[in-house]
Amino acid sequence: MGVAKPKGTKERILRELEASRSRDKSRFDRAPLPYPKKFDEGIDRFVEAVNVADSGYRRQAREMVEAIDHEQMVKWYDETAQHVGSVRLGMFGGQPGKRSSGGKRDMRTTRVRRIAARDGYLCGYCDIRVIEPEVLRMIDTMLGGGILHKRSTPRNNRSYHGIWLMTAVTLDHIEPLAKNHDDSDGNLVTCCWSCNFGKYHYEIAELRLAPPKKNRGANSNWRGLRYVVESHRNRP
Ligand SMILES: [Zn+2]
């Protein structure tokens, strides 16, 4: 199932899940596997760099982004986060329910933006700050290109900067489309790639997850750096 795992991955993830459950139970109960909190510092530094770039100091901003210790993010995403679902299911002794081919989904960028704004650009499972790919691409261009996302073949996780892997927004069907649940806004939540791939096509009850948080837009100052797009557009 899912992405091929190197040998020993399952045992290592199980250990990480157990550690997370005993250390930080409320986060463990809501996210497939909560991201390491130290990644927030990297995101803070990225936001600072974007502000520096937005003020016109683009080379300096690029150096700031290059200085972020993002390898640990790539490694965590690649070796842990995306494989969590089946291991977490096994932790509770569960068997996956029957899966269908999945219904139709609407993942147009306007819909992603609307739901992300509704949810305050925060992942409903792990609370990490998320950013639209359109915004990340624009920031990459501002920084001179090829830093957040390298054009490479084959395209894989290593083509992305850790900041992209950790913050790129997607929408998650809370109850999976692959099990004939619906594609309505009510069944959608703003989600980071880690939680989305970590949750895979399991139901939240199967993974013993609490329902994700939604509708935090009114109480969140974080807007996913949308202002970058606006200020970029208004410039000659
Ligand atoms: Zn998340």
Image (tube, rainbow, N blue to C red):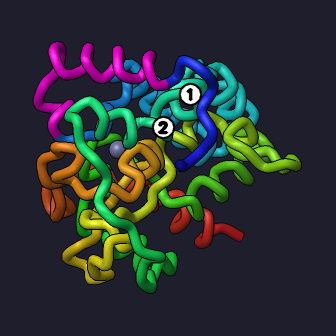
Question: Dot 2 corresponds to which residue?
Answer: 83
Q: How many labels does the image show?
A: 2
As rendered, which of 154 and 56 lies closer to the eye? 154
Confirm or deny contact between disc 1 and disc 2 (CB under 8 A). Answer: yes
Residue 31 relative to residue 129: left or right: left
* Ligand number 1: quarter of image: top left
Tell me which amino acid carries mark 2: His
Q: Is residue 110 above or below residue 155?
A: below
Residue 141 locus on image (x, y percent): 74, 53
Q: Which mark is residue 79?
A: 1
Q: Is residue 144 visible?
A: no
What segment is highlighted magenta in the picture? 10-29
Tell me which amino acid carries mark 1: Glu
The quarter of the image holding the C terminus is bottom right
Residue 146 relative to residue 229: left or right: right
Q: In this view, does 12 lie above or below 160?
A: above
CB at disc 1 and ligand 1 closer than 8 Å: no
Residue 28 locus on image (x, y percent): 20, 31
